[in-house]
Amino acid sequence: MSMLGGNPLVPSAWAVERFGRHAGRVAEAVPVQLAKAHAKAHAAHRAAGLKKRSPYGVALAQAVREYLADMARELGEPVREVLGYEYAVINDHALFPFKYADRPRPLDRARLPSKTSTTRRRMFWAHGPEPRDALFELEDDLTTGEYLQLHEAFEELGASTKLVCLFFTAGVESGIHAIYWGQAHLEPDRTFDWLHSERLPVAPQPLE
Protein backbone atom coordinates (compact mmCIF):
# COMPACT_ATOMS: atom_id res chain seq x y z
CA MET A 1 0.00 0.00 0.00
CA SER A 2 1.43 3.37 -1.01
CA MET A 3 1.86 5.93 1.72
CA LEU A 4 2.58 9.65 1.84
CA GLY A 5 6.25 10.51 1.87
CA GLY A 6 8.09 12.44 4.57
CA ASN A 7 7.31 12.19 8.23
CA PRO A 8 4.68 9.65 9.30
CA LEU A 9 1.20 11.08 9.76
CA VAL A 10 0.23 10.82 13.42
CA PRO A 11 -3.48 9.98 13.66
CA SER A 12 -5.72 11.96 15.98
CA ALA A 13 -7.38 10.46 19.04
CA TRP A 14 -10.67 10.61 17.10
CA ALA A 15 -9.19 8.54 14.25
CA VAL A 16 -7.69 5.99 16.64
CA GLU A 17 -11.03 5.62 18.41
CA ARG A 18 -12.68 4.77 15.08
CA PHE A 19 -10.06 2.86 13.14
CA GLY A 20 -8.11 1.31 15.98
CA ARG A 21 -4.68 -0.08 15.13
CA HIS A 22 -5.19 0.83 11.46
CA ALA A 23 -5.71 4.55 12.16
CA GLY A 24 -2.24 5.69 11.06
CA ARG A 25 -2.20 3.62 7.89
CA VAL A 26 -5.70 4.68 6.92
CA ALA A 27 -4.95 8.37 7.52
CA GLU A 28 -1.88 8.12 5.28
CA ALA A 29 -3.44 5.90 2.63
CA VAL A 30 -6.68 7.81 2.02
CA PRO A 31 -5.03 10.85 0.36
CA VAL A 32 -2.95 8.53 -1.82
CA GLN A 33 -6.02 6.57 -2.91
CA LEU A 34 -7.84 9.78 -3.82
CA ALA A 35 -4.84 10.97 -5.84
CA LYS A 36 -4.80 7.67 -7.75
CA ALA A 37 -8.54 7.95 -8.36
CA HIS A 38 -8.13 11.47 -9.76
CA ALA A 39 -5.41 10.28 -12.14
CA LYS A 40 -7.68 7.51 -13.42
CA ALA A 41 -10.66 9.83 -13.83
CA HIS A 42 -8.52 12.45 -15.55
CA ALA A 43 -7.35 9.81 -18.04
CA ALA A 44 -10.99 8.90 -18.74
CA HIS A 45 -11.78 12.58 -19.33
CA ARG A 46 -8.90 12.97 -21.78
CA ALA A 47 -9.80 9.77 -23.61
CA ALA A 48 -13.41 10.89 -24.05
CA GLY A 49 -12.34 14.15 -25.69
CA LEU A 50 -15.51 15.92 -24.56
CA LYS A 51 -15.80 19.49 -23.30
CA LYS A 52 -19.29 18.89 -21.93
CA ARG A 53 -20.74 15.83 -20.23
CA SER A 54 -17.26 14.73 -19.26
CA PRO A 55 -17.03 11.27 -17.66
CA TYR A 56 -14.70 12.70 -15.00
CA GLY A 57 -17.21 12.91 -12.15
CA VAL A 58 -18.64 9.42 -12.62
CA ALA A 59 -15.19 7.89 -13.18
CA LEU A 60 -13.80 9.65 -10.10
CA ALA A 61 -16.62 8.44 -7.84
CA GLN A 62 -16.21 4.85 -9.00
CA ALA A 63 -12.41 4.93 -8.78
CA VAL A 64 -12.48 6.36 -5.25
CA ARG A 65 -14.76 3.57 -4.05
CA GLU A 66 -12.61 0.92 -5.75
CA TYR A 67 -9.33 2.21 -4.34
CA LEU A 68 -10.74 2.59 -0.83
CA ALA A 69 -12.04 -0.98 -1.09
CA ASP A 70 -8.58 -2.13 -2.18
CA MET A 71 -7.12 -0.35 0.84
CA ALA A 72 -9.50 -2.16 3.18
CA ARG A 73 -8.63 -5.53 1.68
CA GLU A 74 -4.90 -4.86 2.05
CA LEU A 75 -5.52 -4.12 5.72
CA GLY A 76 -7.44 -7.37 6.08
CA GLU A 77 -10.68 -5.48 6.70
CA PRO A 78 -14.05 -6.18 5.04
CA VAL A 79 -15.63 -4.55 2.02
CA ARG A 80 -19.43 -4.42 2.07
CA GLU A 81 -21.60 -4.06 -1.03
CA VAL A 82 -24.77 -1.99 -0.74
CA LEU A 83 -27.00 -1.91 -3.82
CA GLY A 84 -24.06 -2.44 -6.15
CA TYR A 85 -21.66 -0.01 -4.43
CA GLU A 86 -18.66 -1.18 -2.41
CA TYR A 87 -17.78 0.45 0.90
CA ALA A 88 -14.56 0.00 2.84
CA VAL A 89 -15.33 -0.91 6.45
CA ILE A 90 -12.47 -0.40 8.88
CA ASN A 91 -13.01 -1.47 12.50
CA ASP A 92 -16.81 -1.34 12.01
CA HIS A 93 -16.64 2.14 10.45
CA ALA A 94 -17.69 2.55 6.82
CA LEU A 95 -15.99 5.22 4.73
CA PHE A 96 -18.49 7.26 2.74
CA PRO A 97 -16.67 9.27 0.03
CA PHE A 98 -18.36 12.33 -1.46
CA LYS A 99 -17.04 15.05 -3.80
CA TYR A 100 -19.02 18.07 -2.69
CA ALA A 101 -17.59 20.65 -5.11
CA ASP A 102 -15.46 20.86 -8.25
CA ARG A 103 -13.53 23.86 -6.93
CA PRO A 104 -12.07 24.81 -3.53
CA ARG A 105 -14.94 25.38 -1.13
CA PRO A 106 -15.27 25.40 2.69
CA LEU A 107 -16.54 22.21 4.26
CA ASP A 108 -19.50 24.00 5.83
CA ARG A 109 -20.76 24.72 2.30
CA ALA A 110 -21.11 21.02 1.50
CA ARG A 111 -24.60 19.97 0.46
CA LEU A 112 -26.11 16.89 -1.15
CA PRO A 113 -27.63 17.37 -4.63
CA SER A 114 -31.38 17.89 -4.83
CA LYS A 115 -31.78 14.55 -6.64
CA THR A 116 -29.97 12.61 -3.93
CA SER A 117 -31.11 8.99 -3.79
CA THR A 118 -32.92 7.56 -0.79
CA THR A 119 -29.98 5.16 -0.44
CA ARG A 120 -27.61 8.02 0.34
CA ARG A 121 -30.04 9.63 2.76
CA ARG A 122 -30.55 6.31 4.50
CA MET A 123 -26.78 5.78 4.80
CA PHE A 124 -26.48 9.06 6.71
CA TRP A 125 -29.60 8.73 8.84
CA ALA A 126 -29.27 5.03 9.68
CA HIS A 127 -25.50 4.81 10.18
CA GLY A 128 -24.52 8.41 10.91
CA PRO A 129 -24.60 10.26 14.24
CA GLU A 130 -27.79 11.49 15.85
CA PRO A 131 -28.52 15.23 15.56
CA ARG A 132 -27.32 17.41 18.43
CA ASP A 133 -30.88 18.30 19.48
CA ALA A 134 -32.22 14.72 19.45
CA LEU A 135 -33.18 14.79 23.11
CA PHE A 136 -36.34 12.70 22.89
CA GLU A 137 -37.55 9.73 20.89
CA LEU A 138 -40.44 10.38 18.49
CA GLU A 139 -43.80 9.15 19.69
CA ASP A 140 -45.20 6.18 17.76
CA ASP A 141 -47.97 8.26 16.22
CA LEU A 142 -45.43 10.77 14.89
CA THR A 143 -43.39 8.24 12.95
CA THR A 144 -44.14 7.27 9.38
CA GLY A 145 -43.25 4.27 7.24
CA GLU A 146 -40.89 6.43 5.15
CA TYR A 147 -39.18 7.80 8.25
CA LEU A 148 -38.65 4.34 9.69
CA GLN A 149 -37.33 3.02 6.38
CA LEU A 150 -34.81 5.84 6.04
CA HIS A 151 -33.54 5.17 9.56
CA GLU A 152 -33.26 1.40 9.18
CA ALA A 153 -29.67 0.14 9.09
CA PHE A 154 -28.51 -1.63 5.96
CA GLU A 155 -28.28 -5.34 6.62
CA GLU A 156 -25.26 -5.52 4.31
CA LEU A 157 -23.34 -3.11 6.56
CA GLY A 158 -24.68 -4.35 9.88
CA ALA A 159 -26.54 -2.38 12.52
CA SER A 160 -23.37 -1.64 14.52
CA THR A 161 -21.46 -0.13 11.57
CA LYS A 162 -21.03 3.63 11.84
CA LEU A 163 -20.47 6.08 9.01
CA VAL A 164 -17.29 8.13 8.61
CA CYS A 165 -17.75 10.92 6.09
CA LEU A 166 -14.88 11.39 3.64
CA PHE A 167 -15.59 14.67 1.83
CA PHE A 168 -13.35 16.29 -0.75
CA THR A 169 -13.26 18.82 -3.57
CA ALA A 170 -11.69 18.06 -6.94
CA GLY A 171 -11.54 19.43 -10.48
CA VAL A 172 -10.67 17.66 -13.69
CA GLU A 173 -7.63 19.87 -14.36
CA SER A 174 -6.86 21.14 -10.85
CA GLY A 175 -7.03 17.75 -9.12
CA ILE A 176 -7.84 17.13 -5.47
CA HIS A 177 -7.96 20.43 -3.57
CA ALA A 178 -8.91 19.43 -0.02
CA ILE A 179 -9.86 16.30 1.94
CA TYR A 180 -11.84 16.13 5.17
CA TRP A 181 -13.17 13.30 7.27
CA GLY A 182 -15.34 13.23 10.33
CA GLN A 183 -18.87 12.71 11.60
CA ALA A 184 -21.75 14.67 10.15
CA HIS A 185 -25.51 14.56 10.54
CA LEU A 186 -27.50 15.07 7.34
CA GLU A 187 -30.07 17.82 7.84
CA PRO A 188 -33.49 17.88 6.09
CA ASP A 189 -32.27 20.70 3.80
CA ARG A 190 -29.39 18.47 2.60
CA THR A 191 -26.72 20.43 4.49
CA PHE A 192 -24.57 18.87 7.22
CA ASP A 193 -24.08 19.44 10.90
CA TRP A 194 -20.47 18.42 11.58
CA LEU A 195 -20.05 16.95 15.04
CA HIS A 196 -16.36 16.42 14.28
CA SER A 197 -14.16 17.10 11.26
CA GLU A 198 -10.47 16.91 10.43
CA ARG A 199 -8.53 17.96 7.38
CA LEU A 200 -6.20 15.41 5.78
CA PRO A 201 -3.18 16.30 3.63
CA VAL A 202 -3.42 16.10 -0.15
CA ALA A 203 -1.03 13.63 -1.79
CA PRO A 204 0.95 14.36 -4.99
CA GLN A 205 -1.15 13.66 -8.05
CA PRO A 206 0.91 12.42 -11.01
CA LEU A 207 -1.41 11.94 -13.99
CA GLU A 208 -1.65 8.77 -16.06
Image (tube, rainbow, N blue to C red):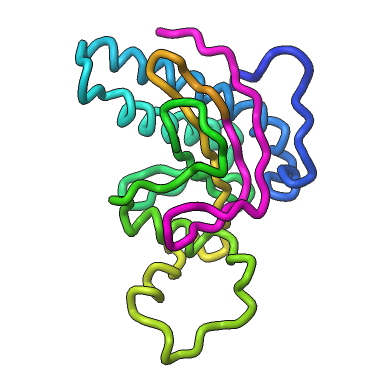
The percent position of residue 51, horizontal first and vertical second, equals 22, 16
Left or right of 104 in this view: 9: right
Residue at 71 percent across and 38 percent down: it is 23
Question: Which of the 4 image quarters holds residue 19?
Answer: top right
Residue 26 vertical placement versus 137 (above, below): above
In this view of the protein, which residue sits in the foreground, 112 or 189?
189
Residue 59 vertical placement versus 151 (above, below): above
Specify the segment rendered in magenta: 179-208
Residue at 39 percent across and 67 percent down: it is 150
In this view of the protein, which residue sits in the foreground, 97 or 65?
97
Residue at 66 percent across and 32 percent down: it is 27
The percent position of residue 137, horizontal first and vertical second, equals 56, 82
Residue 192 vertical placement versus 205 (above, below): below
Q: Quadrant of the N terminus?
A: top right
The percent position of residue 48, horizontal first and vertical second, equals 21, 14
Find the residue positioned furthest to the bottom. 141
The percent position of residue 119, horizontal first and vertical second, equals 35, 56
Q: Quadrant of the C terminus?
A: top left
In this view of the protein, which residue sits in the foreground, 11 or 54?
54
Left or right of 22 in this view: 49: left
Residue 32 shown in magenta: no
Question: How many marks can you see?
Answer: 0
Residue at 37 percent across and 52 percent down: it is 82
